[in-house]
Image (spheres, rainbow, N blue to C red):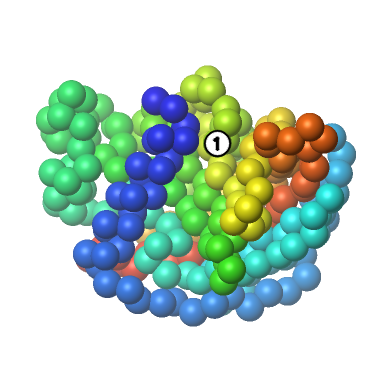
Amino acid sequence: MNVTRRTMGLLLGLAMVVGACGDDDGGLVATTAGSVTTVGDGTTATSTATVGGGCTVEVTGDVSTSWTGPNDVSAFTTDYWYTEDELEQQFGIFGDPTAGTFDEVFGAGGPIFTFFLFNCTGPNGEAMNLTVSADATRADFPFGPGTYAITGGVFSGDEMGADEFAVLFAPNDTDFWGLDGTGTVTIAEWDGSRLTGTFAFNAREAFVTTPRLLAVTGAFEVTCQASSRC
């Protein structure tokens, strides 16, 4: 499946889940100075750590900007934070009938909705989205800490590995950006109630003769909010 169509579909589905769960807000993030991260061709950028929940994005290079996002129900979703009964209900709404029954998909270790969908949205339309491949299984992408490659983006093809990530990135609502090279998602902590980690990638402006180049880093701390398991 095309990365763009697949991720947009997941985002639409997440919006429907959020609408069903209400609009609880876990509060904006407070930030502290963090470490310097090297990405892509050696460009460095300072990533900030989250304290108290939420996310931060730092953009340097030909454009310099940053934003913070809330720790709310639209920030993150994962099959791992839902009960089997809740996943079966989601399958009835979002499931692909050509993939088999719920018992077949769940029994094979495949995603019912997604194993990892993270959003960091800013107050002026800024957005950064990370999602793991739809081909991931529980064996490919286990529940817990780990480090994974970002290899897909808005303008990429479908050659993503089962444990690799796609990114959608928009520092404003006027320019178009794609992934430049590969990046990294590092999950530091991930249990039944809390997820923390960092990300780093390079972005290249699209549809222009002389593209601008950016280094993007950030951090996240989100909590389980939409399941009876939380």
Q: Residue at x 17, y 46 (%)?
A: 93
Q: Residue at the spot x=84%, y=50% of the render?
A: 62
> Quick check: 216 above or below 19?
above
Residue 123 appears in which quarter of the rendering? bottom right
Quarter assignment of residue 98: top left
Q: Is residue 31 above or below residue 144?
A: below
Q: Is residue 13 visible?
A: yes
- Taking the image as shown, residue 227 lies to the left or right of residue 5, namely left
Q: Residue at x 21, y 32 (%)?
A: 96
Find residue 64 and report its horizontal and vertical position in percent: 80, 59
Quarter in which the N terminus is drawn: top left
Residue denoted by label 1: 154
- Crowd around label 1: few <14 · some 14–19 · many ≥20 (10 Å): some
Q: Is residue 50 left or right of residue 136?
A: right
What's the amino acid at mark 1? Val
- Is residue 47 in view from this perspective? no
Horizontal side of 64 relative to 21 (left or right) equals right
Of 63 and 210, which appears nearest the observer? Answer: 210
**140 to 36, vertically: above or below:** above
For the image, the number of numbered tags is 1
User: Residue pushed farthest top?
Assistant: 159
Q: Secondary structure at mark 1?
A: loop
| Residue 94, percent from left and from top | 22, 42
Going 80% across and 42% down the picture, which residue do you hit? 212
Closer-to-camera residue (136/12): 12
Quadrant of the drawing holding the C terminus = bottom left
Q: Position of residue 13 (x, y in %)?
A: 30, 49
